[in-house]
Amino acid sequence: ETEACSRTISRMKGSEAIVSRVLIVLVISISANVALSRATLGSNSLYALNVNNRAIRGYQGHFRNQLSCPLLSSLPHRLLLRGGGEKVDLSGDGGLFKEVLSEGSGDALPQKTDDVCVHYTGTLEKDGTKFDSSLDRNAPFTFKLGLGKVIKGWDIGIATMKKGEKARFTIRSDYAYGVEGSGDKIPGNATLIFEVEMLRWNEKDITNDGGVFLKPLEKKGLGWRHPDKSDEVKVTYTGRCGGAEFVSSGGPVTVKLGHPSSPLPPGVERAICREMKKGSNALITCTPKYAYGDQGLPGKVPPSATVEFEVELHDWNAIYDVNKDGGVVVTCLGQLDTYGPLCDDAAKVKLSLEGRVVNADGTKAEAPFVGPEEREITVGDGALPEGLERGLEKIKKGQHALIRLSPAYAFGSAAPPAGVPKDATVEYEVHVREVTPTYQLTLPDKLAAATRRKEQGNGLFKEGKVDAALAKYDKAFKLVQYEQGEGADADAVKDMKGTCHLNRGACFEKQGRLDDCVSECNKAIEMKPNNVKALFRRGKAYLGLGKLDDAQKDLQQVLTLDPNNAAATAHINAVKSKQRAQDAKDKAVFSKMFGGGKRPQPAPAGSAPAAPAP
């Protein structure tokens, strides 16, 4: 207690520090007498115990009224509340008494604004009637301490509890619900008794089942991002079980999350990914399910043991499997402390570039096959290998990254450059210097980039690479999606949007996604009602969906606009052929229902109903 208070007093100046030191010496001396009296427990000692307790309680008001430091104002509580069943007057006026039932662990106490989590049972002092219990609901209660979110007696009393402590509070009505009471269960002017267990404070339930808790420590970290479950993290850690250290990194080390070689239990990794930021540290508690299970860690952690890890996250390398097939893997080395725009599609980028072949054993060739060199490119225009441009879209201005490409995403069927064997995996080291993101481009630049992507898509479509073509059309549309323009630019924007809808519809038709094809054609027709290509494509899609009336309507409109359209004529004939086939099918079904096609005749008035045809 002396050490904790001395650290606070060292920051004080003048008379406040002198008075504080005097009071602390006095309180510690009285506390020593309390301990001596408890030890001897003679009749005179019992008297001395009561006298000394009253003396300490008398100083509570002075601490509370004269000193602004929370640690000093709570000092009498810290010195007294050590168990033993003694009732302590926390309020100094008999309004709030505390009795420690079971001591907690450590010396830390919750502070104002902390998120406190407790279990409790509340009863009326008058007759012992239970009016509420979190235990009955099996749901701990969480609230912010010291902000009036709970009754006054709780804000004062809970602030004196250590982690794991159980205590009984007797709370007079003016520290509870006053003359009005609360609801039907707590009458006015009622004194209440609460038995409370301090579970934790400022700890987050990572797994939502009580299996992993994270408590932030003094370093809050930077930014808002957290590592992903497949990233490489640079951490310092210490693992303890029952207070005894069983593992320590000894300093910063790099750990591949999710990898069998990771020294961190699954629960610790989950907590890092969910809550920790660059530069932050935390205490992470894991139950056996999320630590070492029923087997434990031989020689270090016993079976079915709960463990604690103190972790500091220095930095991490974000890893992206761009196509989810291992063909383009980006490793961003470290996290930026400031915002940087992404090298998104059509962004103008200045970068340094160096490429090396990756050997069969995973090492890289000593000599690069390209660079190091400075380049200025527009992402997605095709100046670099496709896989490299796809990888760049994950990198921000100012970042240093590695982009590894499998043969298919490096040079594909094209001849590789000098120094690169056929079917070789390559890795590029990239430093992104400057980025002009897409949203900062002028409208003419966006239209030019959209035209480039539309042309790329057309080429891919002709080669039968429908998925790749669709991706290019999607990027072209994204560039002008929210643009309007004026004059000639407005017409160009409208034409580009209509073309993208029409071409996407063609891709969906090839993929057999006829409903999506109809949707895209609808958008193109909405922009240009007499769009012959869109009407024709929608008519074909309706034909494929069996919506013959809709198909004939669209195709007939095509012939009205273009009487010599042979394809539309052929498809109208196909519609008529399908209609005849459908009529014949319907006739056959009808015939079976009513026997050889004989329709039932209406019976003469007054006659009996006709019998069914044989």
Image (cartoon, grey):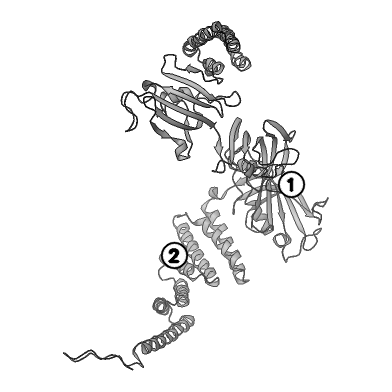
* Number of residues whose C-alpha sits closer than 10 Å to that of mark 1, classed few (under 14), some (14–19) or many (20 or more): few
Circle 1 is placed at which residue position?
A: 261
Point out the residue furthest to the front here: 43
Seen in the image, is 215 located left or right of residue 566? right
Circle 2 is placed at which residue position?
A: 523
When asked about the image quadrant of residue 163, the answer is top right
* Number of residues whose C-alpha sits closer than 10 Å to that of mark 2, classed few (under 14), some (14–19) or many (20 or more): some
Q: Which mark is residue 207?
A: none
Q: 294 or 557, which is in the foreground?
A: 294
Which residue is drawn at the image coordinates 48% and 69% (left, top)? Answer: 517
Q: Nearer the viewer, mark 2 or mark 1?
A: 1
Residue 308 drawn above or below residue 374: above
Residue 397 visible from this viewpoint: no
Q: Inspect the image, locate mark 2, and give the three-letter code of the amino acid beneath it.
A: Lys
Element type at mark 1: loop
Instruction: Estimate the spatial distance between the alpha carbons at disc 2 and disc 1, rounded to whole Å.
Output: 53 Å
Seen in the image, is 149 located left or right of residue 12? left
The mark that comes first in sequence, 2 or 1, is 1
Point out the residue furthest to the right here: 366
Which residue is drawn at the image coordinates 74% and 33% (left, top)? Answer: 251
Q: Quadrant of the N terminus?
A: top right
